[in-house]
Amino acid sequence: MLVCINCKQGLMDPVRSEDEPEYTDHYQCGHCGHSATIPSLLIIISQILSGLLGGGLTLYLMLIHADNALSAREDEASSTFMIEAALVGLAVLLLAGFAYTLYRAACNLIIRHRYRHPGTAS
């Protein structure tokens, strides 16, 4: 049950637009008319899982390629070093993307919590 954080009296009801086939994460208060986008729990869970699993796998691969890059640098194999360093750079970019996914999941969780417990959140 989602309670309006604006009036703290009405319930947030799903709103369906003409062009949308099913109910989405758009809600409107039945008491004061306040509307909001509240992410579903399924979206939040999938963001957390993909952020953790993808980030973990990317971190593992980044560490392997960083080790290979350091070994290639010690062996003075510059072409191998450049390839491995590029792969480490790509892994860093992917890690930033997965970190952003986890950040968005945390923000969405906070939004959902505010509507679930309107008296405790400020």
Image (tube, helix red, strand yellow):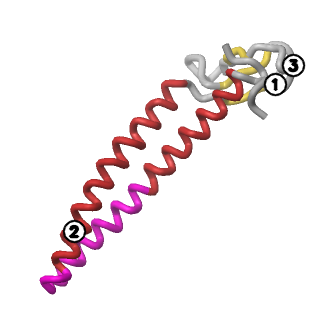
**x and y, in percent, of residue 86 in the image:** 29, 71
Disc 3 secondary structure class: loop
Q: Is residue 81 magenta?
A: yes
**x and y, in percent, of residue 8 in the image:** 83, 20
**x and y, in percent, of residue 42 in the image:** 49, 25
Q: Is residue 41 found left or right of 89 in the rendered image?
A: right
Q: Which residue is mark 1?
A: 34
Pick out the residue farthest to the front: 120
Q: Are marks 1 and 3 in contact (CB under 8 Å)?
A: yes
Q: Looking at the picture, does residue 122 appear above or below residue 8? A: below
Q: Which residue is mark 3?
A: 32
Q: Looking at the picture, does residue 104 appear above or below residue 61? A: above
Q: Nearer the viewer, residue 118 or 18?
A: 118
Q: Earlier in the sequence, mark 1 or mark 2?
A: 1
> Which portion, as a residue range, is magenta?
73-95
How far is disc 1 from disc 2 in space, using C-alphas? 54 Å
